[in-house]
Image (tube, rainbow, N blue to C red):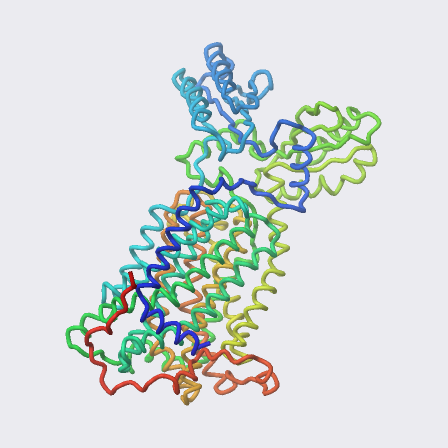
Amino acid sequence: MATFLYRLGRLAFRWRWYVALWWVAILVAVGFSPAKAPTAPDDGFSMPGIESQKAFDLLEQRFPGSSADGAVARIVFIAPDGQKVTAADNKAAIDKTVDEAAEGSQVAGAVNPFQAKAVSKDASTAYSTVTFKDRADDLTDASKTTLEDAVHQAQEAGLTVEVGGDALATQPSAGGAAEAIGIAIAAVVLLITFGSLAAAGLPLLTAVLGVGVSMASILALGSTFGLSETTGTLATMLGLACGIDYALFVVSRYREERARGHAPRDAAGLAAGTAGSAVVFAGLTVVIALAGLSVVGIPMLTKMGLAAAGAVVVAVLISLTLVPAILGFWSNAVLSRSARKRGKIAQTDAHNGGSRWARLVVRHPIPVLLLGVVGLGAIATPVMDLQLGMPGDEAKPTSSTERRAYDALAEGFGPGFNGPLTIVVDARDAENPKTAVSTISKEIAATDGVVSVSPARFNPDGDTAVFSATPSTSPTDEKTKDLVQTIRGERPGVESESGASFEVTGTTALNIDVAQKVQDALIPYLAVVVGLAIVLLLLVFRSLLVPLKAALGFLLSVLAALGSVIAVFQQGHGAELLGVEQTGPIMSLMPIFLVGIVFGLAMDYEVFLVSRMREAYVHGDRPGQAIVTGFRYSARVVVAAALIMMAVFSGFVGAQESMIKMIGFGLAIAVLFDAFIVRMAIVPAVLALLGDKAWYLPRRLDRLLPHVDVEGETLDRDVPAPSALAPVGRPEPEPVPVR
């Protein structure tokens, strides 16, 4: 592989005009495709195989013309202090607001609170539920304006009006200012690392180009594979981060080879053959982790994973072709300013910070190992109290109308009112459907933890009914989860008595089911991803112990990261510092995101750092010296890569949405733990203790495994020896495209 990539790098360097034009042509081609491609269908957040989803599907089937996942706006009316909503003036204003809200073209219905008895006992609060035929993403501006105008009229009448639900809610976004801040910090880190504007700008340029190609491809293929802009959120984040990192490693190795005296073209080839080989396998580990998201069984998550994996593949291809090509244009510009000024490139200092740290770890491996493992283990202890769920309006800032509506309803009607359970009764096989539904309704109403049950609503055929059961506890309370399990546990007896079947659904039950399914899928996902990655790393390092050590180190860092997330967002430690106004359960998909994304990034650092140690060991260094050599050349670049990742992810901690804030914090802290504690401390300590055993591979297995030559052994005989000095001269003449 090293020889092939070496030749590819030299070709890209020589024919740089053609390579650059080729990538520009690809960007233009896929960029124009979305304009002609039909809009991707929004299949929503479906979760096949769980009871809540089955009930939603039954509702859509038995209640034609109504969408089970249509948008909902819950308008909450609060009377001025000392007044009641039932007062004549207030009642008239509420009636008028409900009538005007019902006039929207996409509105399926608007319930008058006085007819539905949706008034609190003290008559201080009332609410109206406005249901829409379409999802929130499909609502037109005209429909939203109609609803907003109706609300403003009630406010002008002196009432306090808040709107909950998803009809007017602002959708969480992970882009915009956060990405800009991340890119700006990345640019500063690159500039400090390289001391050259060209060297700092090259990874940013190629990463942005890669993200552009990836996102345009996602939009172009949207109608065929059901992809959308939402699907590409993860692809954008990882495409940008991995694109910068991969180009960073190639450029760094190019500068290193120039310092050894190689000509620019040979240096570009060597960078592609050595660092490029590490990029290929690092990219493969990320792709494995992302493609493995399909194991969870959530279609949206599968699409996000595959789209992000495609973005990483693009980042790898760009680092192997476009980066060497641009090095052809900037063969000397990417060198440090001091090198260009002196006309000679200095060799990497044998006593730099990385080598000094490595020597310290090699001399004292046991204390470093114990401190790292015990420290991360202590941070991971909150994992024992993990509660999964899906944060709702209660987790939003108090400045949002959704949060104020949530609080008003909880105060006026009880904490469980914000998370009613929807009971769907299939009475098609019952002798008397109405009697069967009445029996089920009475049994559920008598269950401990149920405050009230609404009247049942039948479909046109009269064989299916739906009603709501209001719990006494909030949607995210563990007692609500126990209540759902209790109702489902009593189902066989109730169904036998009534002759009809029923299922429990609604947003609260759906979140509970999603959390359980994700929790059940976590172990199989870990087994698949870690197992495949161990096999891949076995090929890279030709060692039994190094891949196992890499996997165990990752598990330690991801558990510590998850423990930190739980400590802040669930237990509330330091929550105020991050602007978290309400603690609660951890987002159901958070463990999966942490495992998938952090595993890929952790293996990046493992491959880049340990491959340099392996390269030094193969070329004759003793085990301890190989560790020092690896850190001498790679530590600074790995630190820069980790700082860039942390900068990109930390930018999202400033988001108002608790979910985005949680993802940003979790990923940033995970990179901190994995890069600076696991890879920079625990890994060299373990390798120092293992010595030659770290690189042991049984002869029989050695014969069976293909030799991929990540270290570039074959390049020693294929590449001309460098000159004693490394002069900075004019770049090689460049071929010009034939017109």
From the viewer's perspective, is residue 559 above or below residue 733? above
Q: In the figure, is residue 573 to the left or right of 291? A: left
Residue 626 occupies which quadrant of the picture? Answer: bottom left
Q: x%, y% of residue 475?
A: 57, 39
Q: Residue furthest top?
A: 88
The residue lying at 23 percent from left, 63 percent from top is 197
From the viewer's perspective, is residue 383 above or below residue 426? below
Q: Residue furthest left?
A: 341
Q: x%, y% of residue 154?
A: 43, 18
Front-most of residues 453 and 496: 496
The residue lying at 57 percent from left, 20 percent from top is 111
Q: In the figure, is residue 26 to the left or right of 187? A: right
The quarter of the rendered structure image containing the C terminus is bottom left
Q: x%, y% of residue 600?
A: 48, 63
From the viewer's perspective, is residue 704 above or below residue 130? below
Disc tally is 0
Q: x%, y% of residue 495?
A: 80, 36
Q: Residue furthest front?
A: 739
The residue lying at 45 percent from left, 49 percent from top is 233
Residue 168 occupies which quadrant of the picture? Answer: top left
